[in-house]
Amino acid sequence: MRTTWRIGRLFGIKVNIDSSWLIIFGLVTWSLASSYFPAQYPAWNTWLHWTVGVATSILFFASVLAHELTHSLVAIRQGEKVRGITLFIFGGVAEITEEPKRPSKEFLMALAGPLSSLVISGIFTLLWFLSRNLIEPVSALASYLAMINGSLALFNLIPGFPLDGGRVLRAVIWSLTDNRRLATRVASWIGRGVAFLFIFAGIWQVFSGAWLNGLWIAFIGWFLNNAAITGYRQVVMRDMLREVRVEDLQAPTYEAVNPGLTLQRLVDDYMLRRRDHAYPVVEGDQLQGIICLHDVKAVPRKKWSETQVSQVMTPWDRLVTVSVGDDGNTVLSRFGTHDVNQLPVVEGRRLMGIVRRSDVISHLQLQSELGS
């Protein structure tokens, strides 16, 4: 089971590490310390190989973080919202909550990452030049990081979606055709072509004897192919939801509860019988808040019979809501931005309904089955 850990914030952006990142960090460190540096600098002792290997690995992933941070800062400057940055087995990803609405935004956001990697490569090249005849371990570290950051920039500039170069290509086609879906389709086709080249190259290396390197290259190709398919489907999904209103998505019926209800009654009479995990809390016709399963679980079971819903619910002033006239993309954006599973549909404070993630998924599945 994969887990993500929060390691801090940079410029107000949350930085996370996925558990899969530990695998690649260990592999990169082991490869540098046991193979690359011993081959390049056989006179070093084992302790120095491992010290420089660990330091190089840390700085390499710091460079990946800087690459994604640049994407995020440019996105924020363009008015977009960034949920966070996550480092994982394939590097890193900036979690931007919405697709850019203009090709110029896409172009700038996509190009920022490779340019930052080129700048970092230049910095380490300068460090190598200054230290090459003075401190060999520092020059060795700098030489590797200059090379790997330059390679990272060039790799990301490959014009295939979802790589940065593919996003740049999509922005250019989008600007010329004023059709984001067409632009995404073309960039995705090229991205899948690049992915299959990686897969075939990896298989070739496996049969040539370099099985570990070949498997890794093929694995990257598989990831890129899936990402290209998913990226296009997301654009299609957003286009479908743009024409849908909240009143078409919301559940036809819902159950509301009174703020004076005890948690024990809520569990026995509502959650266990109706199998819903969240309920709007209403008094009269005014929405007071929402009570969810995790709110109940936060209270010790022995106190359920004496604790009222109003004491543990998410109150009105902290709710994320939508109105009847909002479109499906607004719903999707608020689900993603605020990490919630249901949204009250309101007019003022009057509850008109509730829309859940499952409602959106069901609508998209039905549209798919109908061939839309």
Image (spheres, helix red, strand yellow):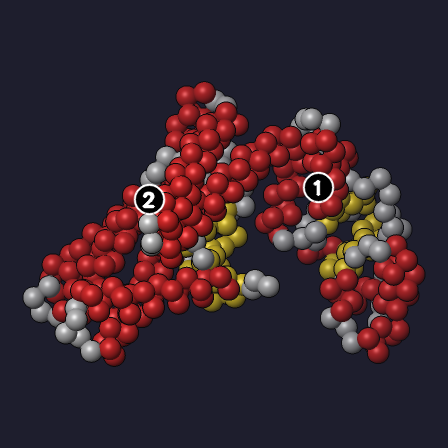
The three-letter amino acid code for the residue at tag 1 is Ile
User: Which is more toward the observer, 87 or 192?
Assistant: 192
Question: Can residue 102 be spotted in the picture?
Answer: no
Q: Quadrant of residue 299?
A: bottom right
Disc 1 crowd rating (10 Å Cα; few below 14, some 14-19, many 20+) is few
Say if 20 sits above or below 224 in the image.
Answer: below
Please provide percent x and percent y for residue 224: 46, 43
Which image quarter holds the C terminus? top right
User: Which is more toward the observer, 356 or 29?
Assistant: 29
On the picture, is 272 further left or further right than 226? Answer: right
Say if 160 sits above or below 289 in the image.
Answer: above
The three-letter amino acid code for the residue at tag 2 is Phe
Q: Residue at x 84, y 78 (%)?
A: 302
Which residue has dot 1 on it? 361
On the picture, is 228 further left or further right than 357? Answer: left
User: Which is more toward the observer, 47 or 209?
Assistant: 209
Which residue has dot 2 on it? 155
